[in-house]
Amino acid sequence: MKVNVLLSPLSVDELYFSGKTTVVIDVLRASTTIVNMLRNGAKEVIPVATVEFAVKISGGMFGGLTLLGGERNTKKVEGFALGNSPLEYTAEVVAGKTIVFYTTNGSRAIVKAKFSENLFVCSYNNISAVASKLAELNKDIEIICAGRNNAFSLEDSCCAGKLISEILVLAENIELTDSALAVQALNKSFGKSIFKMLKESEHGKLLKENGFEADIKFCSKLNTTEAIPYLTGNTLKLLPVKQDQTIIES
Ligand code: MLT
């Protein structure tokens, strides 16, 4: 199994992902928010690459059952029902709903990787569940750090490093590319206190300035859920959890 990390989605085009197994990480905050929409009972999430497309497709959907969510410059987009705070997406708000979701970096990274054979969304909140799924699949992996405005971000890279360190415990014969080795080193340096690292990151500081410090705390929590969003068609759904199988011996 070969593991590669894209430190930003800019370096590749959409066709790069054809047939690949891809993990998208945008810790602050899109991937954390998507994980929590689905864990709280949203029917599905439709990630989009522009605000205009979000408005266009939601127009043809059932009013009460579809919500527009997302941000521009960390703030809710004008006319949208919800922003990009994971705390907004409670069960009361999202259960049974379709969420059309636009964010500056995260949703666009997912759309870019839409030709992947398998696409999963990872955050600190569901990292061990994602690591187990990837070890079970045993395929080459591309981890995309959504980053900031097509550039590197510390928090996505550290999360990628932690994901790799968990896969290394679960699977054998893993080959790491240079970028995969580098993010592991970053995780060792900065990942000891995830909350501190997130607060000190450029995007963390911007979120704090805009009043979203509670989101940073929420995004820093490890393994609060086993929910794994995966892409099917153009839609993110919750990966069904494998039921324990009891083997009855005769
Ligand atoms: C993004 O996708 O750019 C981020 O999730 C931005 C944000 O924190 O709202």
Image (tube, helix red, strand yellow):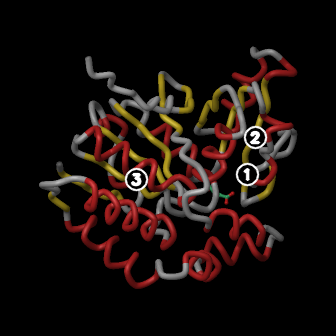
Amino acid marked by disc 1: Asn
Q: Residue at x 71, y 32 (%)?
A: 42
Depth check: give the residue in front, 96 or 80: 96
How far separated are the C-alphas under marks 2 and 1? 7 Å
How far separated are the C-alphas under marks 3 and 1? 20 Å
As helix, strand or loop, the secondary structure at mark 1 comes to loop
Kindly identify which numbered label has been placed on residue 84.
Answer: 1
User: CB of residue at label 1: within 8 Å of ligand 1?
Assistant: yes
Which residue is the site of mark 3?
144
Amino acid marked by disc 2: Gly
Position above or below: 246 against 161: above
Using the rendered view, name the quadrant where residue 236 is placed: top right
Q: Give how far across and how far down residue 151 sits, in percent.
A: 46, 65
Q: Indicate which disc, 3 or 2, sits on the residue closer to the N terminus.
A: 2
Q: Residue at x 49, y 41 (%)?
A: 110
As helix, strand or loop, the secondary structure at mark 3 comes to strand
Depth check: give the residue in front, 111 or 4: 4
User: Is there a contact, CB below 8 Å, between mark 3 and mark 1?
Assistant: no
Which residue is the site of mark 2?
69
Q: Residue at x 32, y 72 (%)?
A: 184
Q: Give how far across and how far down residue 55 sits, in percent.
A: 75, 29
Q: Indicate which disc, 3 or 1, sits on the residue closer to the N terminus.
A: 1
The C terminus sits in image quarter: top left
Position above or below: 55 against 204: above
Q: Residue at x 81, y 49 (%)?
A: 88
Using the rendered view, name the quadrant where residue 166 is placed: bottom left
How far separated are the C-alphas under marks 3 and 2? 22 Å
* Image quarter where ligand 1 lies: bottom right
